[in-house]
Image (cartoon, helix red, strand yellow):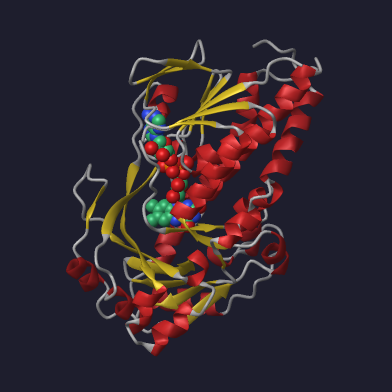
C-alpha cells in the first residue's frame, strides 16, 4: 500500500483533537502542532450535545467521557426575576439513550481527547507556534524556523486564527457580538456551605438551567459527576475594543444580577474570582479552503455560544474532514477514480458551511430571545414558550423561535456527521474526475 496521507493539524483545541483522533482511526499519519507549552483550558464547563456525543460513541470514547460528566436530562429556561419555569426541553429518549447530552469540565474533555490521540499514535507537539504557511508546497513554518510539510494542512487555530487571513488573502478578524461572559466553576461543597435549601435542590438536578432576563442570561449545570458546577453569565459588553479577557470585578458582576432569582444571587456569593470574556463571532466566510489547506472550528465559524454548539460543530468538522480523507486514501490505494485532495476538502466545506451559518444565525436569534426587556414582547415570548407542544410542524411552517422548533432542533442534534460525509463522498465519485494532485 502507498504511504498513508500525512495530516498536519495546527491547534490542539477540541476541533483539532477530534480531527486527529478520527484521522488516526482512518489510518492516516497525524501531527498536531500546538503553540502553548501546556494545555490548560479555561476552568469552565462545556456541553456536549448529541450531534457530538454521537461521534464519540462511534469512536468508542463516549463511556470515557461519561465517567467525568453528567447526562443532562433537559435544558430549562427560567424567568430572571423569580426562577419561574418557562420551558423545559429534553432531547428525547432515543437521543438520550444512544447519544446523550453531556455536561463536562473543559479540562476533562480536552485531557480525554489528548490521551486518546496519544494512545492512537498522534504526534502532538507543544510549543510549536506556526508562523507561516506555504500553500503551494503544503508546508508550515514554526517560530524556530523549522518547516513541516504534509499532504493536507488543517488550520484549527481557533477564534483568533491567523490561518483565516492567510486563506482568504486579507485580514478578517472576528466581530464583537455586544455581549461578554463571566465564567466560573464551584465545588459542590462550596455550594453546600451556602446552606440554602433551594441551591441544594438545584444541585441535585441533572439539567442545564438558564435564567433569561433583560440584556443578560445565566447558565448553570453540573460537571465532574455532580461534584462541581459551572456558571456562565452574560451581559452587555463593556470591555474596551481589543481586550479579549480580563479579571472581573465581583461586585460589578453582582450588581448586574441584583434583583434576579434569589437562587442565582445566592450562588453568586460563592464566587471568589471571576474572568470576563468578550464574546466574538464572524459572518460566513467566502470559503474555507485553499489548495490542500482547510480551516475548521472557530477558525472559520465562531458563533455566540447560545446553543452550546461551537465545539460540537468543531468536532463535526474534524470528523468529516478525517472521514473524507480516509475515503480518499482508500480509493487512492486501490487506484479507483476519486476527487483530488483539494476537491475532497471542498466536499467538507460543502457539508458544513451552510450548516454552521444556520447555527450562527440561530445563536443571534437566541441572543434576542433570551435578552428581551420586560414588557409586551417578553410576555408574548413567555406565553409561547410555556405553550410549546414539541411537535414537528408541517413542512413549510415553523415555530416563532428556533428554541422550540422541533425540526430545527432535530436538524442540529440528530445530525449524523460521519454518515453525511460518506454519502457526500459517494455522490462525488458517481461523477469522478481523475486524480490530479
Ligand atoms: C462562554 C462560552 C461557552 C461555550 N460553551 C460551549 C458549549 O457548551 N458547547 C460547545 O460545543 N461550545 C461551546 N463554546 C464554544 C467552544 O468553546 C468553541 O467553539 C470551541 O472551543 C472551538 O474549538 P476549536 O478547536 O475550533 O478552537 P480552540 O479551542 O480555540 O483551539 C485552538 C487552538 O489552536 C492553538 N493555536 C492558535 N494559533 C496557533 C498557532 N499559530 N500555532 C499553533 N497553535 C495555535 C491555540 O493555542 C488553541 O489551543 C463556548 C464558548 C464560550 C465563549
- Total labels: the figure holds 0
Q: Residue at x 59, y 32 (%)?
A: 349
Residue 436 at x, y percent in the picture = 67, 10
Of 268 and 258, nearer the camera is 268
Question: In which quarter of the view is residue 28 placed?
Answer: top right
In this rendering, would 224 be left or right of 197? right
Image quarter for ligand 1: top left
Q: Residue at x 43, y 84 (%)?
A: 200
Residue 153 at x, y percent in the picture = 52, 24
Question: In which quarter of the view is residue 161 placed?
Answer: top left
Residue 26 at x, y percent in the picture = 70, 32
Q: From where the camera sits, is residue 430 visible? A: yes
Of 154 and 112, nearer the camera is 112
In this rendering, would 398 be left or right of 187? right
* Above or below for 368 versus 38: below
* Above or below for 315 versus 365: above
Residue 242 at x, y percent in the picture = 23, 42
* Above or below for 310 versus 427: below
Residue furthest to the front in view is 119
Amino acid at each position: 500500500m502507498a504511504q498513508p496521507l500525512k495530516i498536519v493539524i495546527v491547534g490542539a483545541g477540541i476541533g483539532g483533537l477530534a480531527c486527529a483522533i478520527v484521522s488516526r482511526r482512518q489510518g492516516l499519519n497525524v501531527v498536531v502542532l500546538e503553540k502553548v507549552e501546556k494545555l490548560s483550558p479555561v476552568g469552565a464547563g462545556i456541553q456536549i450535545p448529541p450531534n457530538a456525543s454521537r461521534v464519540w460513541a462511534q469512536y468508542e470514547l463516549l463511556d470515557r467521557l461519561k465517567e467525568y460528566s453528567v447526562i443532562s436530562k433537559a435544558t430549562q429556561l427560567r424567568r430572571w426575576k423569580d426562577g419561574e419555569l418557562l420551558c423545559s426541553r429534553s432531547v428525547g429518549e432515543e437521543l438520550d439513550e444512544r447519544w446523550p447530552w453531556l455536561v463536562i469540565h473543559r479540562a476533562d474533555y480536552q485531557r480525554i481527547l489528548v490521551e486518546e490521540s496519544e494512545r492512537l499514535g498522534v504526534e502532538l507537539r507543544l510549543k510549536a507556534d506556526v508562523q507561516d504557511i506555504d500553500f503551494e508546497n503544503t508546508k508550515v513554518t514554526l517560530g524556530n524556523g523549522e518547516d513541516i510539510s504534509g499532504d493536507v494542512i488543517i488550520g484549527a487555530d481557533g477564534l483568533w486564527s491567523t490561518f483565516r487571513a492567510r486563506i482568504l488573502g486579507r485580514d478578517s478578524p472576528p466581530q464583537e457580538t455586544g455581549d461578554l461572559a463571566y465564567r466560573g466553576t464551584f465545588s459542590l461543597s462550596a455550594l453546600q456551605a451556602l446552606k440554602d435549601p433551594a441551591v441544594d435542590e438545584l444541585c441535585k438536578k441533572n439539567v442545564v438551567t438558564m435564567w433569561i432576563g433583560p440584556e443578560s442570561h445565566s447558565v448553570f449545570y453540573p460537571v465532574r459527576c455532580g461534584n462541581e458546577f459551572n456558571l456562565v453569565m452574560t451581559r452587555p459588553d463593556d470591555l474596551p475594543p481589543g481586550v479579549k479577557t480580563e479579571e472581573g470585578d465581583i461586585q460589578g458582576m453582582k450588581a448586574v444580577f441584583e434583583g434576579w432569582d434569589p437562587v442565582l444571587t445566592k450562588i453568586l456569593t460563592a464566587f471568589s474570582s471571576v474572568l470576563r470574556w468578550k464574546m466574538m463571532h464572524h459572518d460566513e466566510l467566502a470559503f474555507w479552503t485553499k489548495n490542500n489547506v482547510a480551516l475548521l472550528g472557530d477558525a472559520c465559524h465562531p458563533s455566540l455560544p447560545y446553543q452550546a454548539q461551537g465545539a460540537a460543530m468543531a468536532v463535526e468538522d474534524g470528523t468529516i474532514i478525517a472521514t473524507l480523507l480516509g475515503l480518499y486514501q482508500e480509493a487512492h490505494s486501490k487506484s479507483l477514480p476519486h476527487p483530488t485532495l483539494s476537491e475532497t476538502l471542498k466536499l467538507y466545506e460543502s457539508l458544513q458551511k451552510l450548516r454552521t451559518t444556520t447555527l450562527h444565525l440561530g445563536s443571534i436569534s437566541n441572543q434576542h430571545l433570551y435578552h428581551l426587556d420586560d414588557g409586551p414582547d417578553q410576555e408574548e415570548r413567555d406565553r409561547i414558550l410555556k405553550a410549546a407542544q414539541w411537535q414537528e410542524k408541517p413542512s413549510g411552517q415553523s415555530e416563532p423561535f428556533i428554541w422550540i422548533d422541533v425540526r430545527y432542533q432535530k436538524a442540529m442534534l440528530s445530525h449524523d456527521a460521519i454518515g453525511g460525509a460518506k454519502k457526500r463522498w459517494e455522490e462525488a465519485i458517481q461523477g469522478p474526475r481523475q486524480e490530479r494532485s
